[in-house]
Image (tube, rainbow, N blue to C red):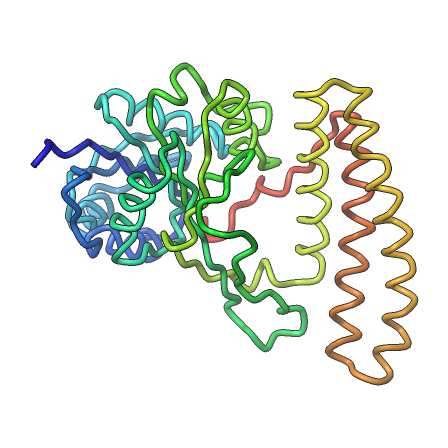
Amino acid sequence: MSKPQTLVIAVCTRARQNMLLDCMGSIRQLTPHPLFDVSVVICDNNSEPMPTEDLDAAKAAAGQPVTYVHEAKAGIPLARNAALQTARQQNPEWIAFIDDDEILDPIWLAEMAQAISTWPAEIYHGWTQSTPADPNGPWSFHQPRNKRPAGTTMDTAGTDNVLFSTKAVEGLMFDEALRFSGGEDLDFFYRATDRNAKIIWVPTAIAREVTPLSRLTFQYQVRRAYSVASVQAYLSRKRLGAQKAIQKSLPKAIGRFFGGIAGGIGSGFLFLINQKKGRKLLLSSAKKIASAIGLVRGTNMNLGQIYQKIDGS
């Protein structure tokens, strides 16, 4: 049997201790696979280091060797860079990123190993299934669904559930200009694919998370739609230049804006017949309008700051 390949699972956290313990516990419960020799990096993105007793509890919960790093400056890309650099110091063949509010399925390692043997690539993106903390809330409409077949090649990836070869991202760092806007992970993996790395979709490698109540409000979901669109347009301009970014974003912005206006009017009539469907259409329409504004502002290199306050921190 060939020697196992080293895999460092990196987790950046500003979360409550019980959330991190649940995440670490899911790593302990992973079914071992002969392809991987697993260890963990915890990057603590708080102004003060994690108390010793909390860190000891997290290490015990993980059931794997844990390296701790403290990044005092708030910001997702700063924390991810600290975690990435710490992981690189161990010279692993593979690095994975998951979020601190996620629970890995026990067969996650096996599914990633199967994907590596089935679809040779440098980067593998698993499926994060999000379910609302209150499925019956007035603005809770999202249901997990797989949008693409297994083995699909992707242009970019998120850091919520991803495994990648260290060679594929050699020299790359997360863009700290995207400190509170989000999108630094999309930018990071766009740069990897721009230099011919291949990303494969692995829907059977599942991480599960619960969307907190604070992210199920009408206001938050509209703000997030704006932020996501502004990041997409910002990255488009960064990669393609102003002219191509405008050509790509402007038609989308116009379509979404007028579609949102029409849907908003329609939601008023629909609400009289079915309140839930009326609320759903109203939320969808408001998100379209916010997204249209975000596309325009992002093309002008203006970004939202939706992650300045982290839920659970």
Q: Image check: 160 left or right of 67? A: right
Q: Quadrant of the N terminus?
A: top left
Q: Image check: 175 left or right of 91? A: right
Q: Please give the count of numbered marks on the rendered protein.
A: 0
Residue 135, image quadrant = bottom right
- Residue 233 at x, y = what percent? 72, 32
- Residue 228 at x, y = what percent? 66, 42
Residue 267, image quadrant = bottom right
Residue located at (26% from left, 42% from top): 51
Farthest left residue in view = 1
- Residue 92 at x, y = what percent? 23, 26
Residue located at (71% from left, 62% from top): 218
Residue located at (67% from left, 69% from top): 139
Q: Is residue 35 above or below residue 207?
A: above
Foreground of the two, 273 or 113: 113
Q: Image check: 206 left or right of 3? A: right
Residue 165, image quadrant = top left
